[in-house]
Image (cartoon, rainbow, N blue to C red):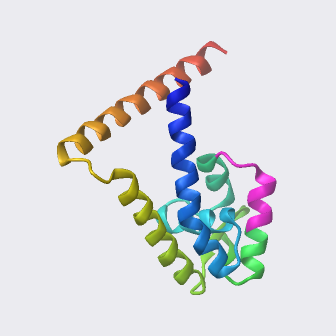
Amino acid sequence: MLEFLEILDLWKRLYEKELHNVCKRYDLHKMDVDILLFLANHPQCQNATDIVQRHKLTKSHVSTSLKFLEEQGYIEKYYQEGNHKTIYLHMLAKADKVIADGRKAQERFQKRLLKNFSEEELKRMKDTFRRMNENVKAALKEEEETC
């Protein structure tokens, strides 16, 4: 199990290295770029709660980053008609270059990670990770039901 956690840590380090140049180029923190990429890659998720829940980040960190992104002109906040409780997020044109460069960094990461794997190996790996996710979801649901 420890080896698996070490592997995940290595993946995270490589991903962060890929994003480092994007952060540096636009003078943004990694969380800022992560939030912009999240919003771009998950159009159905357009509020801070979605970001906090999906990324398992603290509300205060997300809030600070969103405030900065708004001040810098990357996003704007708005309310939907009839709902003045939830603040929604809309990306502005200034975010387009960051997102494009961020996606290129994500693609480089994926290519480097999956280099030298056959299509069959990739298919088996995808199936293995899908099954592992199902096991984890079932275990978490079981834990919630016993609490």
Q: Is residue 103 visible?
A: yes
Determine the image quadrant of residue 34: bottom right
Q: Is residue 102 above or below residue 47?
A: below
Q: Can you give x and y, in whole percent of width and height, for residue 60 in the image?
A: 81, 55
Q: Is residue 82 visible?
A: no
Residue at 36% from the left image edge and 59% from the top image edge: 111
Magenta region, residue range:
56-65
Determine the image quadrant of residue 51: bottom right
Left or right of 126, for residue 146? right
Left or right of 98, for residue 147? right
Q: Can you give x and y, in whole percent of width and height, for residue 128 in the image?
A: 32, 32
Residue at 48% from the left image edge and 27% from the top image edge: 136
Determine the image quadrant of residue 81: bottom right
Q: Main secondary structure of the magenta part?
A: helix
Left or right of 23, for residue 62? right
Q: Can you give x and y, in whole percent of width and height, for residue 87 in the image?
A: 71, 65
Residue at 26% from the left image edge and 47% from the top image edge: 117
Left or right of 115, for residue 63? right
Q: Can you give x and y, in whole percent of width and height, for residue 4 in the image?
A: 50, 31
Considering the image in quadrants, where does the C terminus appear? top right
